[in-house]
Amino acid sequence: MVHVALITYTPDPERTIAVAARVSVSAVGISQLSEKLTPEMVKRLIDRLISSGHLSPFEHVNFTFAIEGISRVTSHQLVRHRIASYTQQSQRYVSFRKFDYVTPPTISAKAELKAKYHQTVSDAHRLYVEMLDAGIPAEDARYVLPGAAETILVMTMNARELMHVCSLRLCLKAQWEIVALFGKIKDEVEKVAPRIAAELKPKCYQLGYCDEAKSCGLFPTAAEIQAEKPSS
Amino acid sequence: MVHVALITYTPDPERTIAVAARVSVSAVGISQLSEKLTPEMVKRLIDRLISSGHLSPFEHVNFTFAIEGISRVTSHQLVRHRIASYTQQSQRYVSFRKFDYVTPPTISAKAELKAKYHQTVSDAHRLYVEMLDAGIPAEDARYVLPGAAETILVMTMNARELMHVCSLRLCLKAQWEIVALFGKIKDEVEKVAPRIAAELKPKCYQLGYCDEAKSCGLFPTAAEIQAEKPSS
Amino acid sequence: MVHVALITYTPDPERTIAVAARVSVSAVGISQLSEKLTPEMVKRLIDRLISSGHLSPFEHVNFTFAIEGISRVTSHQLVRHRIASYTQQSQRYVSFRKFDYVTPPTISAKAELKAKYHQTVSDAHRLYVEMLDAGIPAEDARYVLPGAAETILVMTMNARELMHVCSLRLCLKAQWEIVALFGKIKDEVEKVAPRIAAELKPKCYQLGYCDEAKSCGLFPTAAEIQAEKPSS
Amino acid sequence: MVHVALITYTPDPERTIAVAARVSVSAVGISQLSEKLTPEMVKRLIDRLISSGHLSPFEHVNFTFAIEGISRVTSHQLVRHRIASYTQQSQRYVSFRKFDYVTPPTISAKAELKAKYHQTVSDAHRLYVEMLDAGIPAEDARYVLPGAAETILVMTMNARELMHVCSLRLCLKAQWEIVALFGKIKDEVEKVAPRIAAELKPKCYQLGYCDEAKSCGLFPTAAEIQAEKPSS
């Protein structure tokens, strides 16, 4: 099961954003700017950056997460976000004699399918080990392993990109495992940067409507809003 | 099996690079620059850019490839290259009732393992179809599919990044399937931009030595070069 | 004065986007997909991508522009957009014995200031040439040149990023010279890809409101919308 | 004159790199990996990453610098490095009634030119202030300001990109002011991450030769190496 730990991050993240933001509109030097910033000013500045969409100062803050227990199905989606750094456990260099895998809840819910799923996945892993023992390199034996196979990675992402990715991946129309992953990522950010965590939310909050074909119910779709308007 | 087709690309690629390169060192306008460029000048300019490592003009040329028949093992590696654009066949939205998969040559070479591999992979696909029939969404059923499952994608990459990626992925120490993929990509570029294709080669050609732990034989490793030097 | 020419681009841009988009949701290969696409289907697909915010297929289309006659004030802003490729005329390697510069309309409008502006800028250029003649390298002499100095560059940007950048830079609150630049860029795209050009517009069109402190009048600000709502 | 201060950075940078690197080749979880890492192991791991060119783990470490006293000539070059985040003092929103500027040493060295340079630059600033007083917006008045005008910015760059940028910008053939800037950046990194700072050096150290047209003397050019070889 997905487990996320924040292993390191830019210290004093909200203040760092505020200092950067002030640089762009101030005539004085950075050390002076920094000294004069009270917590109340930091808060107000961040509110203003958010409401005006001036998000570039958020790039100066980075979060590094240890992510464990996600399937390779999900890691393949995750690494499509290009403005981030990833180091992933290699199926080329690591031999997985011990094997953990993810079971989707829709499958767990059906006892008979669940049993077959576990059997099939275990059979695949058994053949994987047999191939290793027969001298097949791990990088080739892994072709038989299922997308369900768990992986581990370290991901560093800045606060601006994290806001963008969460706008897509906290949407309930996203794939369930990646929604869960970013839910836990948000929990971790919450502990050290609550003001930033408050901005980690699905895109509908910014749009004011749902741009998916069918809404989860949180916001109406653009078409539904149109339909509700009184004709005049 | 991997199949690559160049579906579109920046027209007149080598001339485009030469025009861009001249802009940086010329006092006259771009239309004038362009008119005066003979094929011989284009060739000389590109030679000089390569030998001096001034590669930014190569970014103005893009190649768009249709890539079919690679495993998801390999597509997961491929999309780690972040300076490129990818559109990949979705295992969320597409149901794979027909199923193609890749078999590594080391497995094909051993008849008994090969038979077991095909059996195991076929069993996994049979359960996948059974789950679809039982109402499991494709995005969940796919967890049982092996990394061997074939995928399709469209990739756009500029010539500079293509040179960089080939420096890593044409190295024989890279994973065999991705080496084959970039070999075919090079073949496609060769047809329309031979001068650029000539620069698609493993990193050892630029370094003058092999920086892997053990050389494939093309170039000696740095340690081997050091050892060969006569003591004085 | 700013002059923009589209020097090259991905051929058949709208069809390229449609082919890429279909790959992600189709079970069949790319050559088959491509054959079956009628112009009407291309149009419908692009409409759907836009309305659902699925913009990644637009990355497969690139435009390369020759940009002349913008000030270095503006080129400094332009190159802050990082998802693009630039080759710029170098003030290190080129000696500008001939000198063109931009005059902001607010200055042109005041005859006396305009005269002083031209005098001051010309004095700076005269010293620049004197320094060159005295053996100062061009890369140092240029320190005296004004931000008004004209520059030339080649820029390659993909359609998705172009839509994003126009959302910011076609806003009338952006700096006048960069608004003019992207207006001309849009004109060039219009000639070869009208459907894409139609999406090159300020962010307020997507938001449905103005997120600047004060609106240009096209859309009300979020605060104004709030104020208009009847209390209930 | 250029002044650089490291305002924040990823805590325990070298250990962070080592933890990330081990994830890719280990079968155990991240917390276990982290516990077992001794300083000696961190050192050895980083040495091995460097010698093998496996630099992606260095991306997990970010440095945020306050940069003051560089000319806009140099900031325009600096922001061309796209894998970094910048927040720069705006000439649109800030009125520079006080004005600092950079004088290149080649100009300072010639008393007569130096005097003319200061006169011309001061005249430009005087007109700038006069235009502000006449109601010209700062964003337009600035067109008269010279490239020498000082600017302030906050830059965040990861260790991998910093190594790449230094390979280009610590080369003595780079522009003197940007060489000075990255020299000070290296000094700042030295204080908190000496092992990383040791890798901030011009590209010739990795290549083993100079790829510029003429060498500064540190390494011979490729052509010179070729010429030295005994014919056999």
Image: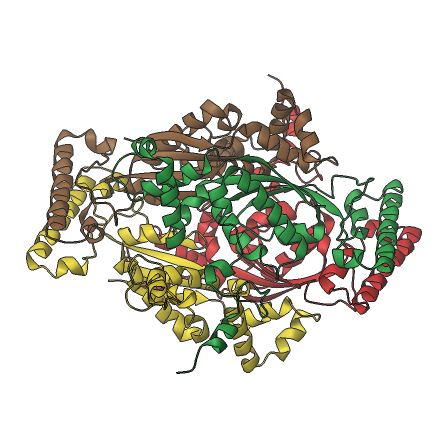
Chain colours: A brown, B yellow, C red, D green
**Count the marks: how many?**
0
Task: Kindly indicate the quadrant of the structure image that contains residue D188.
Answer: top right
Q: Residue furthest right?
A: C112
Q: Is residue C231 above or below residue A92?
A: above
Q: Residue furthest left?
A: B112
In the image: residue D186, left or right of residue A81: right
Q: Residue furthest top?
A: C232
Task: Kindly indicate the quadrant of the structure image that contains residue D229.
Answer: bottom left
Q: Position of residue D166 (x, y in %)?
A: 55, 52
Image point (29%, 31%), residue name? D32
Q: Position of residue D122 (x, y in %)?
A: 86, 49
Task: Kindly indicate the quadrant of the structure image that contains residue B204.
Answer: bottom left
Q: Position of residue D162 (x, y in %)?
A: 52, 48
Q: Is residue C188 above or below residue A81?
A: below
In the image: residue C92, left or right of residue A65: right
Q: Position of residue D72 (x, y in %)?
A: 71, 50
Q: Quadrant of the C terminus of chain D?
A: bottom left
Residue nearest the viewer, comparing B95 with B43:
B43
Residue nearest the viewer, comparing A114 with D216:
D216
Observer able to see residue A81 = no
In the image: residue C164, left or right of residue D117: left
Observer able to see residue B57 = yes
